[in-house]
Image (cartoon, grey):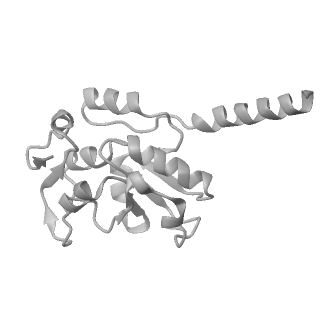
Amino acid sequence: MAKLFSSLLFICMSFTWTAAQYTKTASCQDPGFDRKVDSYLKYSAPVISVTAAHKAMDSILFIDARGFGEYKVSHIPAAKFVDYQSFSPDMVKDIPRDKKIVVYCSIGYRSEKIATRMIQAGFRNVSNLYGSIFEWANAGYELRDLNGKPTKNVHTYNRKWSKWVTNPDYKILW
């Protein structure tokens, strides 16, 4: 019985450690948005800033964890779509485990969940895009539509979240 209890305690402690083993290493331009993003994250996956991700775009595989309706409006160029609602590690089984991967969604909540699952599945170089596509648009970085053409449209999930896309060059859709 003591061995069983010890084993369960170790498993619980291990889960607690892995659930919050990373720290905040990025921030958003807008302090209010930064606080909002920070409040939603558990830091169960490392984060990367949009600036750092943009600088390293050529060596990164971006994974879009939003719904298809959001993805088709706009996404980061060459991003691979994986639906948050139906994600399974089998969807990314053909990606090399050491490939540099950045997962994103609207603000980083859904992408953190997907990034964490990928880390648990053995991917060794996965990050969550801090502030995700909203911060990407706020920084003025390029987005593409479903046909691969540049767009200035951003799907903000719903009206409530629209206030966090502050770059006036982008049109908000929901």
Residue that appears at 32% across and 69% down: 78
Most distant residue in the right direction: 2
Q: Nearer the viewer, residue 174 or 63?
A: 174
Question: Looking at the picture, how far across and down is residue 100, in whole percent?
Answer: 50, 62
**Which residue sits at x=86%, y=33%?**
4
User: As displayed, is residue 2 above or below residue 90?
Assistant: above
In the displayed structure, would residue 70 be above or below residue 164?
below
Tell me if residue 56 can be seen.
no
Q: How many marks?
A: 0
Residue 107 located left or right of residue 163:
right
Determine whether 156 is above or below 1 in the image. Answer: below
37 horizontally vs 17: left or right: left
> In which quadrant is the N terminus drawn?
top right
Q: Nearer the viewer, residue 132 or 71?
A: 71
Q: Can see residue 89?
A: yes
Q: Nearer the viewer, residue 165 or 10?
A: 10
Question: As drawn, is 95 to the left or to the right of 105?
Answer: right
In the image, residue 54 lies at what x, y percent?
Answer: 33, 56
Percent position of residue 152, x then y? 12, 56
